[in-house]
Amino acid sequence: MMRLPNIFLVGPMGAGKSTVGRQLAQALGFRFLDSDQEIQRRTGVDIPTIFEFEGEEGFRNRERQVIDELSQEEGIVLATGGGCVLHADNRRDLAARGLVIYLHCSPEQQGARTSRDRNRPLLHTDDPVQRLRELMEVRDPLYRQIADLVVSTEKRGTASVVKEIRKRLETELP
């Protein structure tokens, strides 16, 4: 099999980027990195705290720096934050520096998967699923713009998604 480039997972919150990313990295013998975890490690605080003190713009600036740095590593699977595609430089760098896989699932599935997670500042609203629909409307075209592969995680287990990705990496890429 050919030497795989870095793999960057994009998609909405709750799509399974971190969970799938960990298992995919293990299966491929790559290192797993998570941009949100790296931001938290560097700042020493959780993402809701960054949003509280710096707003979404402050968080996105930190995210931009982390994605620029991490996407230059080698032999990695990188799980990105759901909103990273909002920044044109992130889209450019991810598309140019590796293979982008869009993990897709419906806002309803996202809502079910994130309902008990308090580390989602964008979902602190009366109707989280409606908010997820609004985010998807803006972000879905951006995910698709840079995706080399689109893989559904809707009502699927992690092992099944990882197996599909591995098979498609072998059969669909030049």
Image (cartoon, rainbow, N blue to C red):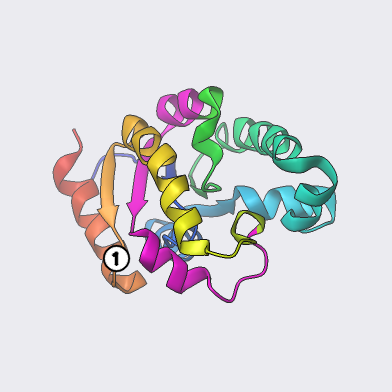
Q: Quadrant of the C terminus?
A: top left
User: Closest to the observer: 133 or 110?
Assistant: 133
User: At 62% across and 47% down in the image, what residue appears?
Assistant: 35
Q: Report which quarter residue 125 is drawn in.
A: bottom right
Q: Is residue 10 visible?
A: no
User: At 81% across and 51% down in the image, what residue appears?
Assistant: 52
The secondary element bearing badge 1 is classed as: loop
x and y, in percent, of residue 119 in the image = 67, 64
User: At 61% across and 71% down in the image, what residue appears?
Assistant: 117
Query: Looking at the image, is 97 positioned above or below residue 15?
Result: above
Report the magenta residues as a range: 91-120
Q: Is residue 116 magenta?
A: yes
Q: Amino acid at mark 1?
A: Glu
Query: Looking at the image, is 105 positioned above or below residue 92?
Result: below
User: At 45% across and 58% down in the image, what residue appears?
Assistant: 130
x and y, in percent, of residue 16 in the image = 43, 62
x and y, in percent, of residue 144 in the image = 32, 36
**For residue 101, side relative to residue 68 (left or right):** left
Q: Is residue 82 visible?
A: yes
Q: Which residue is mark 1?
A: 154
Q: Is residue 117 magenta?
A: yes
User: Closest to the observer: 55 or 102?
Assistant: 55
Residue that sits furthest to the left in the current view: 171
Q: Report which quarter residue 157 is drawn in.
A: bottom left
Q: Quadrant of the N terminus?
A: top left
